[in-house]
Amino acid sequence: MTEKYLIFFDIDGTILDNEYQVVPDSTVRAIAALREKGHRCLLCTGRCRDIWPKEILDIGFDGVVGGCGTHIIYHDEELLHATLEPALMRELADDLVRFHIDGVLEGSAHSYFHREPWMPAVVGFFKEPRPTRDIGRSVSPEFEQGKIEFLDSPTLDFDKMALWFDETGDMDSFKEKYADRFDFIERDPTFYEVVPTGYSKASGIEFICRHLGVPRERTMSFGDSTNDLPMLRYTQVSVAMGDGNPDIFPEVDYVTEPVMEDGIEKALQHFGLL
């Protein structure tokens, strides 16, 4: 593979190991080597900008396709940011209370939570430090980046949702109400990633390819979960992490080693990019 590629990397479970919450040295080394050779490397994540980890950004990437395609930044320039109507955001936040669903409402400047989250994954996000590095154009001046907000905030500003629920919640009713406006990506039986209809990791990659004039034939992606499937199906070359969700394995060109066993570096060597 001698052509220059656009290479897209998921964060959680791909760049960042889910169990140890570290990035292998081999991954950092491989991404630096790719960029030295003229390939362009971008993050392609479900996370919105408020929870893009600074330590991941500092590895060095050419851009970010964030929020499952709702927010795209390339070389610090914001190219696309799809936002929700204020009335819809308020309705969603109120319905999470009404249907007793826990979660994170993710935006570029804030993440919004219940005042007392109860699902373990949400509690983890609630305690996670917010980034301090500003990527792309400045957010609206009324917002302080990195500040945690709550569902009852008088002003809401978010792009998508990550929702967890247990037997006390009524996710079925919530899904039925919003099925025509949002795609519900089942990550596990109690976890949905909820994205405005029409946006996905694939739509984000298609947008950046058009913007840069790069044909789809020169794209490659790495992922580990079901929210990566649109990305993995879209790019010319697709790689699944060996410790990822096995449901995605039949959909990819290559299943590499687990994250902490140098999976990214080994896959790039397999395809002759290093």
Image (tube, rainbow, N blue to C red):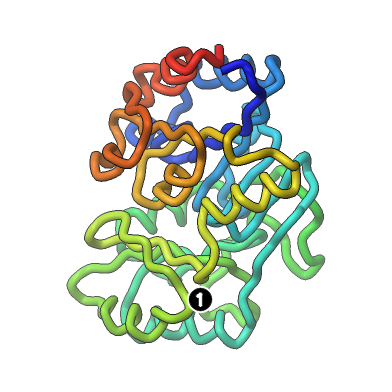
Q: Which residue is mark 1?
A: 151
Amino acid carrying label 1: it is Leu
Residue 31 located left or right of residue 74:
left
For residue 213, above or below residue 184: above
Q: Quadrant of residue 214?
A: top right
- Between 117 and 157, the one lying in front of the other is 157
| Residue 120, position as x, y percentages in the image | 31, 55
**Rendering coords of residue 126 (x, y %):** 46, 56
The residue drawn where x is 55% and y is 44% is 44
Does residue 134 appear anywhere in the picture?
A: no
* Viewer-closest of 127 and 134: 134
Per the image, label 1 sits on a secondary structure element best described as loop
**Where in the figure is residue 199, as x and y percent of width and height?**
54, 63
- Residue drawn at x 40%, y 65% is 103
Up-down: is 229 above or below 29? below
Query: Can residue 121 be seen here?
Result: yes
Provide residue 134's location: percent of width, then percent of height. 74, 47
Residue visible at 68% across and 15% down in the picture: 37
Q: Is residue 236 above or below residue 201?
A: above
In this orientation, which residue lies closer to the viewer: 62 or 103? Answer: 62
* Residue 260 occupies quadrant: top left
Q: Report whether 203 appears left or right of 262.
A: right
Callout 1 crowding tier (Cα within 10 Å): few <14, some 14–19, many ≥20: many
